[in-house]
Image (spheres, grey):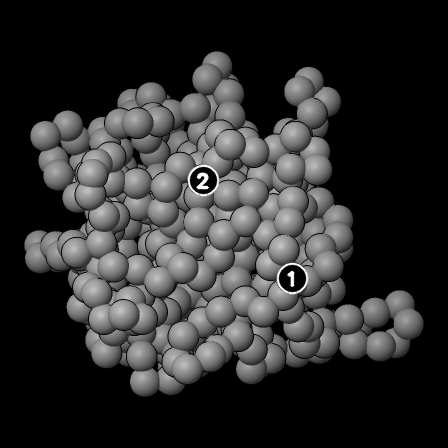
Amino acid sequence: MGFVLAVAVLVAATHGGVGTVGSTTGERCDAPQRGALEMSGDVGDFRRGVIDDPVHDPTLFRGGDTFYVFSTGRLDAADPGGIFARRSTCSLAGPWESLGAIDLPEWTRDYGVEHLWAPHVVDVDGTFHLYYAASSFGSNRSAIGLATTTTPGDLASWVDHGAILTSQPGDDFNAIDPMVFTDGERWYIAYGSFWSGIQLQPLADDLRTPEPQRTVVARHAEPRPNAIENPQVFRHGEHWYLTVSWDFCCRGVGSTYRVMVGRADAPTGPFVDADGVVMTDGGATPLLARRGNQVGPGALDVLEHDGRLYAAHHYYDAASGGTIRMQIREVEWRDGWPHFSDDAT
């Protein structure tokens, strides 16, 4: 996919207008789908000592005729997991196939990792850039790393380039949950969790050198802790949108995660909610909360496909005691704001 197409379709690591994938019946198996997709295959599972199929913090992208979801790795203090990968060669609904993990870079062990976190993948002229976080839970001694390849499904082909951005105790930000996008002229990296909130910095054309200016574009309402993370910036029509995850993940069915959104006229903000409250003052419009057995949905990532926008996110499955799984939904629009019209019971 070329740079111009990447910008025109969805400025945030997405790409559409791709070819048809065949099925055994001769019908098109990647036909556009509506609402919450009926997911199949390896969409996340955990049974202690039996299976660990992680799907937390998914990033959704396409390479050729294959859809990919990369996510936070397996949790193991003794043997930390690298970024986990899965693919579907048929449709966004699946069937999804787990591929295993990209090897953990040795430099990340200095950050006390139990696994790598919250990846984001952007395709630039056929070279895939994987951004990920190395940190330990609750700390802002953190780093954002970068790896690249031209063959994303070959997990051994990813070449790691080390840390591109770091934070440490005493800083007012946390360098995790990276998301990289372009407005057609400049590249940006959005990131952040807790502390002063979501940060935004320009990137040089090498996509690995943050430029000095750093801006806070969203924070949670007081009082602290400032439970906000997982930024996603994308364009639709004349506006730019910033989605974030509010409140607390990682508590199984006790998780309070939810997705909030703001809108701006420029990729750098100011982002405001539907009532006109600026996101740096705690404004944000609810987009996605619990849906049936899907508790604590969060870490939204978007992909343009066949002229429609889809969002991937994780959730905690109340029907299985809190197993982390992934869901993909069509993003719909009402009065210039994204929404999900599927069953909200």
Residue 247 at x, y = what percent?
37, 41
The answer to whether residue 238 is above or below residue 280 is below
Q: Nearer the viewer, residue 17 or 225?
A: 225
Name of the residue lying farthest toward the bottom? 238
Count of numbered marks: 2
The residues bearing labels 1 and 2 have C-alpha atoms spaced at a distance of: 19 Å
Residue 212 appears left or right of 12:
left
Residue 189 at x, y = what percent?
26, 57
Q: Earlier in the sequence, mark 1 or mark 2?
A: 2
Q: Which residue is mark 1?
A: 343
Q: Residue at x 38, y 49 (%)?
A: 245
Residue 336 appears left or right of 53:
left
The answer to whether residue 265 is above or below residue 168 is below
The picture quadrant where one finds residue 42 is top right
Name the amino acid type tagged 2.
Answer: Thr
Q: Residue at x 29, y 23 (%)?
A: 110
Crowdedness near tag 2: few (<14), some (14–19) or many (≥20) residues, C-alpha within 10 Å: some
Crowdedness near tag 1: few (<14), some (14–19) or many (≥20) residues, C-alpha within 10 Å: few
Quick one: quadrant of the C terminus? bottom right
Residue 199 appears left or right of 334:
left
Q: Residue at x 51, y 21 (%)?
A: 76
Name of the residue lying farthest toward the top? 78
The answer to whether residue 148 is visible is: no
Name the amino acid type tagged 1.
Answer: Asp
Residue 253 at x, y = what percent?
56, 33
The answer to whether residue 4 is visible is: yes
Q: Secondary structure at mark 2?
A: loop
Mark drawn on residue 256: 2
Mark drawn on residue 42: none
Residue 334 at x, y = what percent?
46, 79
